[in-house]
Amino acid sequence: MVKSNQTFRDLKILMQTLPSQRKRSLIALVPVSIVTGLLDVFVVAAIQRLFTVVVGAPNKPQLPFTELIPNDPKIKVIGLVIAFIGLSWLSSLSKLFLRTWQVRIKSQIWRDLSEMAQRKMLGQNYEYFIGKNNNELSATLPVHIDRVSEKLILPLLQLTSGVFVIVFLCVAVLAVEKSIAIILIASLLVSYV
């Protein structure tokens, strides 16, 4: 199914035409996405532990590094609130950094596509320009490149980065509560599709 899809074929052609430096930038985006996903999991774990302490429920499952926080409930709540705030800041900063990197890569790909189109257009024979309306060519080319950049490349970068967040959160929820997690993941899949 994937091989017969026109979008995937076009995406494969696009990736083949990109310079190797841009491909390396895309690959380097993966670890940043993974770190962002893990930070989101840590934020969820901190808030989960904070609520279990406030409610007085047992620490199930045992989260790592909980022995570093004293057993006094007031100090534990304060420590968990500080940890939650710190992790939330780190998570937000990592998302900001990831978004900045995505937009930067998108603009670099836009520039690469513009340069390729310009080279191909300038490489045409003189007769090509005689038969064409030059104003139309110079007006439509940047519009098409911008559409590819805005409607294809940026959403794909965001989708790729978002997959890690979703997978890590699903795995974390599955590790904590399997029956609820299966219902939650199934409902998310049904609502997404």
Image (tube, rainbow, N blue to C red):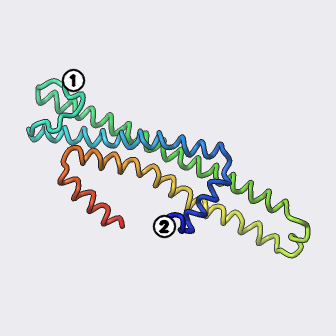
Dividing the picture into quadrants, the one containing residue 92 is top left
Along the polypeptide, which appears first: circle 2 or circle 1? 2
Along the line of sight, which residue is nearer the eye, 111 or 59? Answer: 59
Q: Residues within 10 Å of mark 2 (few under 14, many from 20)?
A: few
Q: Identify the image quadrant of residue 81.
A: top left
Q: Furthest-right residue in view?
A: 126
Please identify the quadrant where the C terminus is shown: bottom left
Circle 2 — which element?
Answer: loop
Question: On the image, numbered disc 2 is attached to which residue?
Answer: 1
Residue 104: give x, y in percent of width and height: 58, 47
Residue at (17, 53) in percent of width and height: 179
Q: Is residue 2 above or below residue 104?
A: below
Marker disc for residue 145? none
Residue type at numbered disc 2: Met
Q: Which mark is residue 68?
A: 1
In front: mark 2 or mark 1? 2
The answer to which of 76 and 153 lies nearer the viewer is 153
In the rendered view, does 185 fall on the left or right side of 73?
Answer: right
Image spot of residue 182 (x, y percent): 23, 56
Q: Residue shown at 30%/36% (left/top)?
A: 85
Report helix, strand or loop for mark 1: helix
Residue for point 82% across, 70% down: 134
Q: Amino acid at mark 1?
A: Leu
Residues at marks 2 and 1, CA–CA distance in whole angstroms? 51 Å
Which of these two is toward me, 66 or 5?
A: 5
x%, y% of residue 125?
89, 66
How many marks on residues?
2
Relative placement, left or right, of 101 versus 55 is right
Is residue 5 depicted above or below 62 in this figure?
Answer: below
Residue at (20, 31) in percent of width and height: 78
The crowd level at tag 1 (other Cα within 10 Å; few <14, some 14-19, many 20+) is few
Relative image position of residue 145 (x, y in whole percent)? 66, 62
